[in-house]
Amino acid sequence: MSAPRVRIAPSPTGDPHVGTAYVALFNRTWATREGGSFLLRIDDTDRSRYQASSEEQIFRALRWLGLDWDEGPDIGGPHAPYRQSERQEMYAEKIRELLGTGAAYRCFCTQERLSALREEQNARKERLGYDGHCRSIPIADGERRAAAGETHVVRLRVPEGGSTTFRDELRGPIEVRNEEIDDQVLMKSDGFPTYHLANVVDDIAFGVTEVVRAEEWLISTPKHVLLYAAFGATLPRFFHVPLLRNQDKSKISKRKNPVSLDWYREQGYLPEALLNFLALMGWASPSGEEVFDREHFAEHFRLEDISLGAPIFDLEKLDWLNGQHLRRLDAAEITARLEAEGMMPEGADAEGLRVILPVVLERLHRLPDVAEKTRWFFGEADPYEAADLTPPKGDLRDVPATLGRAEECLRGVDPWELPAIEAALEAARADLGVKKPQLFMPLRIALTGRKDSPGIFEVIEVLGRERSLERIAAAARCAGEAVDA
RNA sequence: GGCCCCUUCGUCUAGUCAGGUCUAGGACACCAGGUUUUCAUCCUGGCGACAGGGGUUCAAAUCCCCUAGGGGUCACCA
């Protein structure tokens, strides 16, 4: 069996879509593992929805995820060009071929006639679709009118009887009666091909062996099968993967879910976490692991194991997964990500991050959490009120003395390391005769300005002697002033 | 509405192809405990599903049929 060739064919019509990444993940992972090729083709045959910036955005987003391609518009390949708008002559030639064999015909119906037809069919509750009005126009007439510049499209001539059958590798045989298949427009009046034509022509030209695409294409596959037959080409294997869903089970949409890959990046999700999450939306590891990397996925993934249920997007699980992946990274790596994403905390540097990251790591879910959780380290303690220093089940009036004692004990610490710090605070606590929270909570506020923080010993250690003592003294003064007033 | 596809805990899923080992397993979320200086992590436990009905069979989540529900599609969009 020859090496597989698979592709994705996104449309440059807006932000890079999470569904594109979902399908790309399955395609690329499998093909690469099998020693095959993963192609990127830009489906830009719709001029009305075309957005120039979109193509570059798609490239960037896919590369961010590590879903890079072996052949594509920007890197070329043996079958270039990979942009459908640049393959016009090929489609025109194939259309002539279909016209010649009678597999397609020219249709001169106006938009007005078509919409009137649709209305009528709707009113009579008939099956919607083209009525074959232009099917019987003699070829010579059609050619003459086309040559005279008469506006028209080219349609697929679907056989009148019988049915078209193909196999979806995930579902088994699928049969559709030909009368249910519309005479699909293959070439629009502007001379551009529709998806159906361009897709089949290109897949044949590129030698695509497996078509792994979204389920929304399942029902138009018979049209494609008819085209393969008209071209005398071998059918690829089809895998239609379930659509990602909104909460209400409708297909995932901008209105109800974040669908732009850029959004996930801006939110500080890790590529490996998003990939892991996407993989989980349609596949389960045979070993039962839920948190895994690309290597694990690549090793065990099989196309035929994609599940058919309609997966609903659950961002909560993504958050959890992202935290898991974050914790697998070391400080240097996280620093690199922060820099790459422009998410470095204010005032941060690599050395500071090397020190602080291990201390806050298990409290992180997304990249921006780093800035939020380290503000007290790279800057000052968050602003607080004197009242915030009040210990649990305690009194603000005791705070100046409590903090004062802590400061004194800390003063003698040397070296400034965890065990000595811990011992010093334990001594202070014993002197004071208070419970841990009554000493630690005021300290926590004094040092970080927040009720949630890493362990207090770690905080003191990473803050260093000078800053720690300063903040404790400042807090003591603050509490003292409030008590006096 | 026609056609096509799908249907296991709230969510993602394992199990379905080769019926028994399934009083249906795991994960997220949630709840309750534990560890603990807060938060978080971590550990333990709990809650919680085979859409319904027929059939086939000694035996069905697994096979067949029907019903219901959901989705997709019916564009000169992809």
Image (spheres, helix red, strand yellow):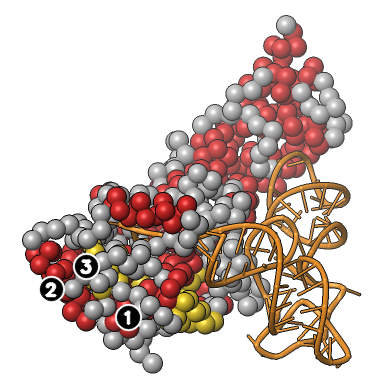
For label 3, the residue is: A106
> Against A13, is B45 above or below?
below
Spatial separation of the CA atoms under disc 3 and disc 1: 19 Å
Q: Amino acid at mark 2?
A: Ala
Q: Amino acid at mark 1?
A: Tyr
Give the numbered dot on residue A140: 2
Which residue is pictured at 54% across the width and 46% down the height?
A: A256
Front position among marks 3 and 1? 3
Quadrant location, the C terminus of chain A: top right
Instruction: Determine contact: label 2, label 1, CB under 8 Å.
Output: no
Spatial separation of the CA atoms under disc 3 and disc 2: 11 Å
Measured as percent of width and height from the top left, residue A158 is found at: 35, 75
The kind of secondary structure element at disc 3 is: strand
3 and 1 marks on the same chain: yes
Can residue A217 be seen here? The reply is: yes
For label 1, the residue is: A228
